[in-house]
Image (cartoon, rainbow, N blue to C red):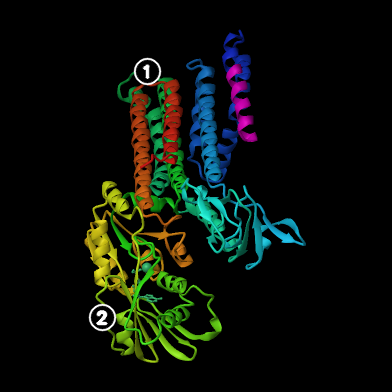
Amino acid sequence: MSRKQKKMLIRIIIAAVLMVGLNFVPAEGAVRFLLYLVPYFVIGYDILIKALKGIRNRQVFDENFLMAVATVGALVLAVTGDGDYTEAIAVMLFYQVGEWFQSYAVGKSRRNISELMDIRPDYANVERDGKLERIDPDEVETGSVIVVQPGEKVPIDGVIVSGQSSLNTSALTGESLPRDAKEGDEIISGCINMTGVLKIRTTKEFGESTVSKILDLVENASSRKSKSEDFISRFARVYTPAVCCSALALALLPPLIRMFGMGLDAQWSTWLYRALTFLVISCPCALVISIPLSFFAGIGGASREGVLVKGSNYLENLSKTDCIVFDKTGTLTRGVFEVNAIHHSTMEDERLIEYAALAESASSHPISKSLQNAYGREIDRTRVKDIQEISGNGVTAKVDGREVAVGNTKLMRRLGVTYMDCHQPGTIIHMAVDGEYAGHIVISDVIKPGAKEAVAALKKAGIRKTVMLTGDAGAVGEQVASELGIDEVHCELLPGDKVAKVEELLKQKSPKSKLAFAGDGINDAPVLSRADIGIAMGAMGSDAAIEAADVVLMDDDPMKIAKAIRISSKCIRIVHENIVFALGIKFICLILGAVGIANMWLAIFADVGVMIIAVLNAIRALFVSKL
Ligand code: ADP
Ligand code: MG
């Protein structure tokens, strides 16, 4: 509990005790009035001040104004003998109880989320003269060596230069199994080192490291508003003035009609009381607070599962998704290719691989990384010049002064090199040296474990259509798609073709539903931003992809897409429940109040009760059931 919340709690208790106690004090008239003013001001002074400020700033109609008018009105009625003081104070008291509860709940869920995201490292260890020194992670330069001891968080992304350990990545990925890491492995910041001492050569600055990026994303997520939230703020702007005018009409019209129209007694105080009750009932706080809170909780629940959603609007769109388009390499397959065979080579096989690895030395494509792995030795960058990457084709470079081209049949045709077809299944990497065909390398990728289940889980979560787009050759694409149970596949696409295909699919779908694209961002960043929702693989994906995407999966597991969709559906369901529930109860109470059945007590109970239930319901979005 914060200091402010404690103070409020004390005010609530004092006012409640005084309110009840004063019933037993035998004071009359003005003395009684003055005595009751004490608990009234204790509990309500800040509301009155806020209401006055609102009037001065010409933003009259808000909850504070409603409460001030209602309670002052009730006091006036009590003075004239038609009402009772306790009621006036109770309205203010319960309103404050509701406000207190709400600030407590919001504070709690915010804290919950930051605890869940407890990944911000406070320091980094560097070794100086044989001693460990703790320094601010911001001050560590790229390429320096940091030491992470067991139990500490990895502060900056890097590569392990010595030591081995198991890592707890649960804060990042939601995955509870520890992951082993050894010398030479890449390591991302935010995981916790569990067993051994690790020395890490940093590859990024702190500000560019995974952990900083994630925290930025989460902290900024609530600034992108969903349609439901927009609806509520627009609604409140019209609603509150409308209610105030109705209350005024309720206080004036019936008595006037009775007096002049029917010649009866005006019953001013009865109608004033009803109008005040109407005002109390109409306070829209349950809606105003519970909708953003639901989204906030939904985003928090998702991040605990290793799914970063960059804004409530994306969470809302995710729940409307009925078509998902996948990239193949790195998204559904691991993107780690193994060399299966080398055919028609005009030189020694090792030489061919060496040329391939050197030419690929600057590329971040999974194929390039795999060829470099197959080469297995340190790359001497001085041997390579004039590297050019042609996306969806391959690369060309000068290696030891010779023109080397590494890529698919498109690249060979482009360079006018006659190539040999290959009948072995797999991705075929053709090579040309000095404009002459030099053979091809057959490599193959494996489907990610769980990818098939992920596609099935998506179907179960209500996705109507799954599509795979790939730049790879037809045979490979068709095979992967049929193995995974994907509905539609398009192969041999250049990055631009992928955009065109997605645009085509966008046109086909019904206007209300949304289309999501999931990719690793290598060659597909434009598609990520073109789709209604872009989902990027965070761990392997490029930085550009993480920037361009709306949703980032921390551990590249396609199953998380189904999870994200289920989280979003649950969150939206809660939002709708709250809207219907809060407005429904409001509406019923308003009618009861207008015809005089509901009194002010019922009104305040209805308001606070609805709010508490709505807030509790919103917090449910934080918890996601296991698949
Ligand atoms: P995907 O859609 O499967 O992710 P890409 O669009 O990234 O595929 O690439 C399509 C094809 O282009 C690859 O299958 C490969 O044949 C070729 N290619 C792209 N980049 C490279 C590269 N750096 N080296 C060799 N081949 C490449
Ligand atoms: Mg790709």
Q: Nearer the viewer, residue 81 or 223?
A: 223
Quarter where residue 32 is shown: top right
Q: Which residue is mark 1?
A: 265
* Closer-to-camera residue (554/406): 406
Q: Position of residue 509 (x, y in %)?
A: 23, 59
Report if residue 21 is visible in the image. yes
Crowding near the residue tagged with mark 1, few <14, some 14–19, many ≥20 C-alpha atoms within 10 Å? few
Q: Position of residue 248 (x, y in %)?
A: 41, 32
Outermost residue on the right side: it is 129
Q: Residue at x 32, y 61 (%)?
A: 326
Query: Height in image: 512 above or below 41?
Result: below
Residue 622 lies in quadrant: top left
Quarter of the image for the C terminus: give it: top left
Within-10-Å neighbours for mark 2: few <14, some 14–19, many 20+: few
Three-letter amino acid code of the residue under disc 1: Asp
Check whether the beta carbons of the residues at disc 1 and disc 2 lie within 8 A of each other: no
* Residue 506 visible in the shown view: no
Give the secondary structure at mark 2: loop
User: Does 13 lie within the magenta span?
Assistant: yes
Residue 224, quarter of picture = bottom left
What SS does tag 1 mark? loop
Q: As shown in the figure, which amino acid type bears the numbered disc 2? A: Asp
Task: Indicate which quadrant contains ligand 2.
Answer: bottom left
Q: Of label 1 and label 2, which has the lower sequence position? A: 1
**Of marks 1 and 2, the one in the foreground:** 2
Residue corresponding to mark 2:
421
Residue 397, image x and y in percent?
Answer: 45, 85
The part of the chain drawn in magenta is: 1-18
Position of residue 508 relative to residue 392, above or below, is above
